[in-house]
Amino acid sequence: MRIALMLLVPLCAAGAILLVRKSFFSKIVLAATAVIQFVLALSCKNQTQVLQLTSKISFALDEMGSLVLNISSLLFLVVSFYVVFWLPTEKKAALLRNNNHGEMGENIFCALMIFFLFTMTLATTAQDFGMLWVAVEASTLASAPLVNYHRTANSLEAMWKYLLICSLGIGLALFGTMLLYVAIPGTETLNFKVLSVLSSSGKVDLPWFKAAFVFFLAGYGLKMGLAPFHTWLPDAHSEAPVAEAALLSGALLNCVMLAILRVIGITPAELLDFTTAFLKFFGIFSLAVAAFFIVRQKDYRRLLAYSSVENIGLIVLLFAFGQKDFAMLHMVGHSLWKMTLFLIAGNILLSCNVRTISGVRGLFSRLPLNGALWLLTLLAICGTPPSPLFFSEFMLVKSAGVLWGSVILLLLFIIFCAMADTALKMCMGGNDKSGLLPEIDAKVEKMALIPAFSLTLAVVCGVSVALSWIN
């Protein structure tokens, strides 16, 4: 019953917003839906219930699905409350600066955000590869229009780039699903549990399964932002409104990662070395690409996008080296930190009206709360204690061996230096008074309390892990 409610509530809420078409009503429904969804997600913990639609289509929650659902619901809850204050402030700032580009209507924006939540819920609860594919494709269709919220030439280009490249990836994933059906003969369903039983019993055509895995990894890896399939990600994350960018990076990438884990979960024992080798290669490659572009990055929102590429690579590596628990910890920590960073970046953009790192100086004097959060969170996402990422990265380096561990540690050090340099440059120095809007700055400082909440959650998570290690 709870799973059915989690799927129905967002659909009904989005429909109600589109019917009423009132700004105030849209924001209230957005926040209310987020609260209801979060409560339902928490109440489903350790539930064994199954929503059976047909003999072949069912929805349920396992350990990984429950974790990703809880992360997505928590992030959507925080982001929805931020949106309630961000929408009027953003429009006020655009009006004062005379740079209004005819933004998307608030009712359309809120309805698409809620439908985006529905697609992520669908992906985490789906119990077969067919419905999982539908959910990931639907997430692209729900989130793509949001990228073009500001209706600028750059945002339009980013939207089409995101839509076309991710659709290509989904096409590859669909072909991989078809190959998987061929690789496991004697089944009329793509249910995870059924395929797992057949796989463990040896009823798998290994060459076909290898081909299926390659297409799965290429298709879903493209949507997940693994290098070299990441080309859409920096544009979409930097041009989308910060609320959507926070969900794209902190929530959606986890949902797509879940698709890769579903395939690994049914992989025959004979092919585990084959799949692990692919994960290690793309994980290291993603880390290297992220390090290269973060060092030379001039746009602080694109910097956060490449940080997503880095952390997806780290999560993939943790799974490849057998550190499942720490991979799940890294998912939680990265999602909380990245959402915090994108929301603070939105505040900085509202105040300074510039996206270049060189154009932002003196945050400590102009926006002291946002500046402090920006510095702390940039350091924390690099694994500075008590960040939970410190423990996951430590275990990754430890389990990777001397050679791989040294390479990973070097790349992490390069990224840390680049992030710290960016944070200090933006926070220190004199306060540029050009374009100063005291009314907007005052609102932005109050809005910083929302990302401060998520930062606190991440710190509590890190401290809890540290105490468990000590004990």
Image: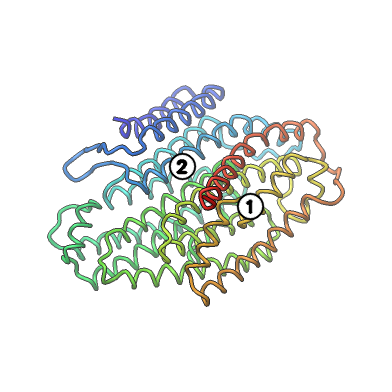
- At x 63%, y 30%, the residue is 85
Nearer the observer: mark 2 or 1; the answer is 1
Depicted 323 relative to depicted 64: above or below: below
In the figure, 217 relative to 96: above or below? below
The amino acid on which the numbered mark 1 sits, given as a three-letter code, is: Ala
- Give the labeled residue for mark 2: 72
Q: CA distance from mark 2 to mark 1?
A: 20 Å
For residue 227, side relative to residue 456 (left or right): left
Horizontal side of residue 384 vs 441, given as left or right: left
Drawn side of residue 217 relative to residue 385, left or right: left
Q: Name the amino acid, label 2.
A: Ser
Tell me the SS state at disc 1: helix
Between 432 and 281, the one lying in front of the other is: 281
In the current view of this chain or complex, which residue is farthest to the bottom?
A: 403
Residue at x-position 26% and y-position 72%: 270
Local secondary structure at mark 2: helix
Comparing 186 with 156, the one in front is 186
Judging by the rendered image, the residue that carries numbered circle 1 is: 380
> How many marks can you see?
2
The foreground one among 283 and 185 is 283
Q: Which residue appears at 28% of the width and 53% of the height?
A: 129
* Image location of residue 92, percent across then percent down: 70, 31
At 78% from the left and 52% from the top, the residue drawn is: 359
> 10 Å neighbourhood of mark 2: few (<14), some, or many (≥20)?
many
Q: Earlier in the sequence, mark 2 or mark 1?
A: 2
The N terminus, quarter of image: top left
Q: Position of residue 49 (x, y in %)?
A: 26, 36
